Image: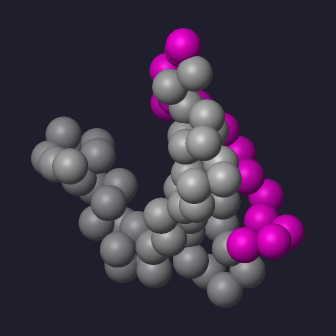
Amino acid sequence: MGGALWRTSSYSGSNNNCVEHAQLADGRQAVRDTKDRESGALVFDADSWQHFLTAVREGTFDI
């Protein structure tokens, strides 16, 4: 993921509850915890990214 342009989500909360997003060169999407960047990132292909966003928006994302 070298060279990825990471952006802090505009939906991130205060108190360091932030996530960052990057679109990778191959079209995949990556998300990581701003507080713990060294732990890696979740990486999604296009279909999985859309499913993830839909679940978050609808409140059905379950961890």
Residue 17 seen = yes
- Residue 44 located left or right of residue 8: left
The number of numbered discs placed on residues in the rendered structure image is: 0
Question: Residue lying farthest bottom?
Answer: 26
The picture places residue 58, in percent across and down from the top left corner, at 19, 43
- Residue 45 located left or right of residue 26: left
The picture places residue 13, in percent across and down from the top left corner, at 49, 21
User: In the rendered image, which quarter contains the N terminus?
Assistant: bottom right
| Prevalent SS, magenta region | loop
- Residue at 50% in and 71% down: 43
Residue 38 highlighted magenta (yes or no): no
- Residue at 36% in and 66% down: 50
| Above/below status of 11 relative to 52 | above
The picture places residue 38, in percent across and down from the top left corner, at 66, 53
- Residue at 85% in and 69% down: 3
- Residue at 45% in and 73% down: 44
Foreground: 40 or 47? 40
Residue extent of the magenta highlight: 1-15
Foreground: 18 or 7? 18
The picture places residue 14, in percent across and down from the top left corner, at 54, 14
| Above/below status of 34 relative to 53 | above
Quadrant of the rendered structure where residue 25 is? bottom right
Residue 9 seen = no
